[in-house]
């Protein structure tokens, strides 16, 4: 069983297999399941993600009214304009937003690794898909590669906003996506690790400060930026750029930053954007009254 | 290693918006339903900490009642759970509690009908995982995501041996087990997490074992 990214990359490269294959084989061994069972379960998750993106692109609105409809705006903008940031990047953004808007509207999603950060992995997948034309099997592999890197983060650091801030949720999700994009684009396992490191480095310190404590503001837009970050970092890694700080050390830095982060900035709706005048106003509107401060 | 499966990371499939406030809450409700063994006629749900403050926005109330109706985290019927409960004549009341609890996401659920009632405390620990920390006054630690059997029994020697003997005969492996009691020599609670769901016939056999008063189960 791999304990860190270095071991994961070493296992893949010494055997000449992909990261996704290392993850599939480990899952079969740990759960005593056949390849068909393991791959089949992930395929069902893929179906859920695809449906969530479709639903979000049709337009949804959350119960609180704080989020919804932005994925549609982006798609309409792309029909009429050549996006400055590029079609694939903005498509990924719209699909990440679509997923998190569906989540906020109590739709069905697959937590990757959490519900609040569920947009980055499927958002990027269904956008780069249009460029790379993967088979369904390769799309399932994308999810195993994401899962392999998330597995390391979850075991060595944290994937919880309450424990480590948004860097642990959207930061991890974006890093997982970056690593998976690299593999699908034909990069090496080492390049996947570099992409993860570059992404996470640029998410370090990101706090979890949801308005009214809801998984909406700023979570939906943070997934948009997580998806953008992932695609940019994947391109950098594929260009041969490496991270001066190795991936495992970046993960460790993220963990330590999370531990020193004030409680007010870890999913308590007490600091950051949640505590701005507008944040408090929105909170009062959602609940009918303002929440008491502790 | 806290996480053992890739599906702990890529999953669960769930109704949004929050793995802790929605999926975890549904699992607490469903554990209560499972342990009660039938659909309750009434429910008194006390919410603490972050649950108490944000439950309406997160659908924590809907999710818990969805769990009481035996819905899984990804069951879309969760969204209409409050209406469904009303139609079925289930009387549900929510109480926003001010007092401080050890865990920020805590719910105390009392459910019942004309034949009996049950009270449990559940916490949602993140990523959709939940734990039951109290059942009818007994302290315990139960994930609710593994099959388990819970037995109220007289606090006498031989009670545990008779239960584990029956499980062994049916080749059921015990993953985790704990025993707690309120007072020596009175009633005690045995919690046994197992690897597979337990058949009704085995539960009946357990009910007849020495010193056993009541048997309930959690299904996967």
Image (cartoon, helix red, strand yellow):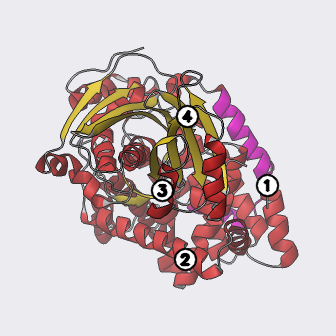
Residue at (38, 15) in percent of width and height: A293
Q: Position of residue A263 (x, y in %)?
A: 55, 24
Whole-percent x and y of residue A281?
A: 26, 25
Label whose residue precedes the other's in the sequence (1 or 2): 1
Residues beneath discs 1 and 2 located on the same chain: yes
Quarter holding residue A21: bottom right
Disc 3, SS? helix
Q: Is residue A115 magenta?
A: no
The chain identifier of the residue carrying mark 4 reads: B
Callouts 2 and 4 on one subunit: no
Task: Nearest to the eye among marks 3 and 2: give it.
Answer: 3
Q: On the image, numbered disc 4 is attached to which residue?
A: B140
Asked if the residue at tag 4 contacts the one at tag 2, i.e. Cβ–Cβ closer than 8 Å, the answer is: no
Give the mark toward the camera: 2 or 4.
Answer: 4
Give x and y (percent) for residue B134.
Answer: 48, 31
* Numbered range of the magenta stretch: A231-259
Which residue is labeled 3 in the image? B203
- Residue that numbered label 2 is attached to: A139
Write down the chain letter for disc 2: A
Q: From the image, tell me which residue sits under label 1.
A: A3
Mark 3, residues whose alpha carbon is within 10 Å: few (<14), some, or many (≥20)?
some
Q: Give the left or right position of residue B174, taking residue B186 as reference.
A: right
Task: State the predominant SS element of the stretch in magenta.
Answer: helix
Please state which of residues B80 and B90 is positioned toward the viewer in this rendering.
Answer: B90
**Marked residue chain, label 3:** B
Q: CA distance from mark 4 to mark 3?
A: 20 Å
Q: Is residue A237 magenta?
A: yes
């Amino acid at each position: 069983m791999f304990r860190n990214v270095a071991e994961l990359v070493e296992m893949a490269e010494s055997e000449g297999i992909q990261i996704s294959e290392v993850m599939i084989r480990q899952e079969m061994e740990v759960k005593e399941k056949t390849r068909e069972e393991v791959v089949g379960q992930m395929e069902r998750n893929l179906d859920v993600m695809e449906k969530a993106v479709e639903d979000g692109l049709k337009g949804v609105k959350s119960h609180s009214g704080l989020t919804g409809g932005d994925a549609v705006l982006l798609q309409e903008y792309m029909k009429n304009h050549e996006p400055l940031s590029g079609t694939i990047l903005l498509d990924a953004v719209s699909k990440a937003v679509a997923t998190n808007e569906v989540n906020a509207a109590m739709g069905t999603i697959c937590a990757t690794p959490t519900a609040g950060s569920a947009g980055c992995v499927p958002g990027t997948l269904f956008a780069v898909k249009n460029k790379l034309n993967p088979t369904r099997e390769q799309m399932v592999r994308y999810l195993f590669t994401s899962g392999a890197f998330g597995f390391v983060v979850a075991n060595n650091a944290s994937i919880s906003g309450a424990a480590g801030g948004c860097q642990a949720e959207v930061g991890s999700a974006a890093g997982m996506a970056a690593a998976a994009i690299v593999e699908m684009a034909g990069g090496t396992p080492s390049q996947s690790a570099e992409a993860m490191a570059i992404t996470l480095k640029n998410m370090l310190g990101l706090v979890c400060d949801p308005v009214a404590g809801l998984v909406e503001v700023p979570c939906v837009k943070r997934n948009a930026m997580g998806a953008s970050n992932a695609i940019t970092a994947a391109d950098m890694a594929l260009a041969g750029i490496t991270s001066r700080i190795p991936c495992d050390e970046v993960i460790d830095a993220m963990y330590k930053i999370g531990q020193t982060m004030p409680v007010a900035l870890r999913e308590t709706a007490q600091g950051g954007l949640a505590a701005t005048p507008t944040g408090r106003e929105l909170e009062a509107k959602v609940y009918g009254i303002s929440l008491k401060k502790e | 290693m806290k996480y053992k499966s890739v599906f702990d990371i890529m999953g669960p499939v769930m109704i949004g918006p929050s793995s802790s406030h929605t999926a975890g809450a549904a699992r607490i409700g469903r554990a209560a339903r499972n342990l009660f063994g039938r659909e309750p006629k009434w429910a008194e749900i006390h919410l603490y900490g972050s649950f108490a403050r944000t439950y309406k926005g997160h659908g924590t109330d809907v999710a818990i009642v969805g769990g009481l109706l035996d819905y899984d985290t990804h069951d879309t019927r969760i969204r209409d759970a409050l209406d469904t409960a009303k139609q079925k004549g289930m009387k549900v009341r929510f109480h926003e509690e001010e007092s401080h609890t050890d865990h920020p996401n805590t719910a105390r659920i009392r459910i019942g009908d004309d034949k009996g009632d049950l009270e449990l405390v559940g916490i949602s620990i993140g990523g959709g995982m939940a734990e039951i920390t109290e059942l009818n006054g007994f302290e315990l630690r139960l994930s609710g995501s593994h099959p388990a059997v819970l037995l109220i029994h007289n606090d006498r020697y031989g009670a545990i041996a008779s239960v584990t003997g029956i499980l062994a005969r049916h080749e059921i492996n015990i993953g985790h087990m704990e025993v707690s009691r309120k007072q020596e020599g009175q009633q005690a609670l045995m919690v046994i997490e197992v690897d597979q769901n337990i058949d009704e016939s085995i539960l009946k056999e357990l009910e007849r074992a020495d010193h056993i008063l009541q048997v309930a189960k959690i299904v996967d």
